[in-house]
Amino acid sequence: MSADGARPAGERLAPIAVTVAVLACLFGLGVLAYAYHDLVRVFPAAAALAGFLLLLTLGVGYLLPRRFRPVVAPAHVTSLMCVGWGMTAATGCAIPANTGLGGIWAKTLGVDFADTWGAASTAPFNEETLKLCGVLILALIASRAIHAPIDGWVYGALVGLGFQVMENLLYALNTILLDGATDPGASVDASFVARAAITGWGSHWAMSAVAGTGIGYLVARDGRPLGRRVAVAVGCWMTAMGMHWFFDAPLPPGWRGTVLKVAVNLAIALLVYRTARRHYLARFREVAAEEATTGAIRPEEAALLPHRYGRRQARGGSRPRPARVLIGEIENAQLALVAARIPHADPQSRTLAEGLREEIATLRSHLRGSRAGPPSRPTGEPGGPGARRL
Amino acid sequence: MTDARIRSGPRRARWWGPLAVAAVLVLLAGGWPLIGSWIAGDKRITSGTVFRVGPDEHHRAWFRVGSGWTLDRAATTPSRVFVLRHGDVDLSIAYISLPRAEDADALWSGLRETVRVGDRDARLGPPGPVTADAGAPGMAGTLTRDGDTGRAVIYPGPEDAFAIRLIALAPPDTTDPEWLPVGDVMRSLTFTEAAA
């Protein structure tokens, strides 16, 4: 697999789930366009600046969670699906949902309560649920995209990222009005600095990563009892809501409170990541070691396989291009083999694994053939940097 | 290469799973507004009530309302904006944050742009001087927006750290007596609690 992302899953898509996802994204986009097109019309330069800053934060933010995925980054198509859900469906649905629930608090508990506690009483439930739906719909569209809780963490972070960058844009546009449109460009800049550079480290991506981990635990075919998987998923969702509540609550006040909130949310997200990563890598190494007995993954390959750099080194050196391509294909098949066997209770795992082992054997024989042919035998091999016996 | 992930989703969840997700979206995006619409939003205000608008103790202003006013609770956020109604007249009193004191010079031109959001044909007249009952100087002008006519007033706060913007709009045939209570509220604005 290439270092910049796994291949698209290529599985048969669930038509109902795809339809729901497309309609939800279109609805969300429509709500956003309806609510903000006038602001963009009146303040085109500031809106363009906000759009540029959105792309900037999106670009940086897109790289991080995908790079955090151990072994190999998720496919771009599923990653972008998650970002798209966060930017459109989740954000667009959150506007009427938050307005509606916020209005209920103001009408029933008073405007002072709604002003102080409205955000903390409204956004955690609405927004964490809407973002979580993005990971759920991905699991329903492409069930094989989520092998383990760590995949839920990554996809959850990407949904949260999409939500976060779109919310940054909307807040920036709102800030223009809150500042009386006295200096629209400065309002956009100040809003982005506060939301992207300061609070952005412990905001939506972190909350959704935690909630997404629960979905990863729920849908990974690990043979655990359904009740336990549901309990963990609900627990992660509630933890995410708790993080969101803490983030939106008026306590502790001031900039120290803001820094504390960001730090706590970041710490929780990284703690969950560390646990999910450790669990995933342990299982990965276990499967890779087991495959040594079948010959599909040799012990020295098993040591390199989890590491992007190790795989790149193995493909590198002074080999001719056909050999490098074949080694890459063997690595891809080995990664797919391990991925297929990582779920403990996947009924199709055995069939898939057998096919992949045969494929690896065939590729190895092709590689041996390419080395035997006269001009293609590389100099300095074996024994060069990162060289492997394949 | 065979991809180990090539297969369809969980058979049992193929139809009810997506529909459950759709139901959640509909319930959240449509359910809360629907429930909210069943609860009355307007609350009658006792004559002589003093309201405080602004986010903290250093950025606040006070205003007094007379009889016959209602408060739109769903649209009101005391730290930012109050939305009041008296007959056919809608009155909003909004806190404007000013990141820099020199931004106060652009308050009227900023308002001219702001009122165009939602109505590209909105027209704001030139500003004239106005003084609140407690002495706060401000600027006022006529406003036409969404077919309604009215008046906009801006009072810059102490040291130009913030400003309060009041906008009153009503159908063109609204009579002068109906406008009188609006003028009373607009002039009641003060930046000192003692004067409220």
Image (cartoon, coloured by chain):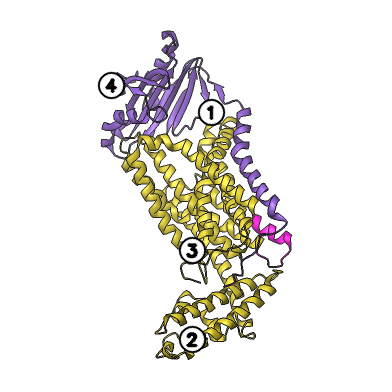
Q: Which residue is mark 3?
A: A66
One can see residue B171 in this view? yes
Chain name for mark 3: A
In front here: A234 or A114? A234
- Which of the chains bears the disc numbered 4? B
Residue A336 image-quadrant placement: bottom right
- Residue at mark 2: A370
The alpha-carbon separation of the residues under discs 1 and 3 comes to: 44 Å
Q: CA distance from mark 3 to mark 2?
A: 34 Å
Circles 1, 3 touching at the beta carbon (< 8 Å): no
Say which chain is yellow.
A
**SS category of the residue bearing label 1:** loop
- Disc 2 marks a residue whose amino acid type is Ser
Give the residue type that dot 1 points to: Arg
Q: Position of residue A337 (x, y in %)?
A: 61, 75
Residue type, mark 3 in image: Arg
Residue occupied by mark 1: B73
